[in-house]
Amino acid sequence: EPEVTQTPSHQVTQMGQEVILRCVPISNHLYFYWYRQILGQKVEFLVSFYNNEISEKSEIFDDQFSVERPDGSNFTLKIRSTKLEDSAMYFCASSEEGRTGRGGKLFFGSGTQLSVL
Amino acid sequence: DAKTTQPNSMESNEEEPVHLPCNHSTISGTDYIHWYRQLPSQGPEYVIHGLTSNVNNRMASLAIAEDRKSSTLILHRATLRDAAVYYCILSGDDKIIFGKGTRLHILP
């Protein structure tokens, strides 16, 4: 069964460093998402991406964050200067149909645990 | 996105049916009702979704009230593997916003 793949599974970085989290969405999917989950808290929407541009972003997704689809298979989340509070599990998701308001389904990866020291 | 209300936690016995309720009294006419779950240490997983009619798939059934102000996720025969947080979500656009969900405990 096709799945969303995220690498690395764990990433440790120093505060102020840049990190890039990588995702390989399901191959025929066109809509891509990043979510994060701070330990013990709910899953939070960060950004959605379609047709090589951001569709929507949350208040969390400030200028420190950026997303890119550098080629036909990868989808990346970059955090330019990490803060302690960026420590979280980051989930990538993809969807074929996109619009969940029309019944689109999201498929999630197993996440990258980011630890900022 | 309109708000949903779910119990914080529920318990069920293994091999018995489980009914997970969700209230969404402010649902709009075009909102889809989605259910996702998150098993321990895993990413969220799609379970089922519907608009007006009841829906069945290999994982679960979704019963939607006639006025659409509530819905129930039905796991027909719970296993230990079904222990997870279950999220009831309304979506009228192109994203899923997670609430706190219901933590389902399965008793062996």
Image (spheres, rainbow, N blue to C red):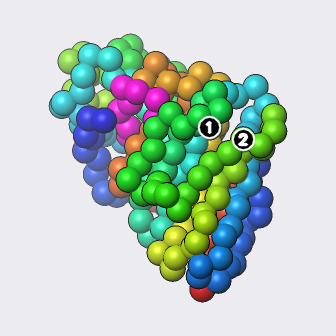
Local SS, label 1: strand
Q: Quadrant of the C terminus of chain A?
A: bottom right
Q: Check contact, mark 2 vs mark 1: CB within 8 A.
A: yes
Q: Residues within 10 Å of mark 1 (few under 14, many from 20)?
A: many
Amino acid type for the residue under numbered disc 1: Phe
Residue at screen point 62% across, 37% down: A32
Q: Nearer the viewer, mark 2 or mark 1?
A: 2
Is residue B79 among what the camera can see?
A: no
User: Which residue, given by chain and number where applicable, does mark 2 sit on?
Assistant: A69
Q: Nearer the viewer, residue A108 or B48?
A: A108
In this view, A72 is above or below B52: below
In this view, A54 is above or below B14: above
Mark 2 vs mark 1, CA separation in Å: 9 Å
Region in magenta: B87-95
Location of residue B8 (image quadrant)? bottom left
Amino acid type for the residue under numbered disc 2: Arg
Q: Nearer the viewer, residue B94 or B14?
A: B94
Residue B88 is inside the magenta segment? yes
Marker disc for residue B88: none
Q: Position of residue B30 (x, y in %)?
A: 32, 17
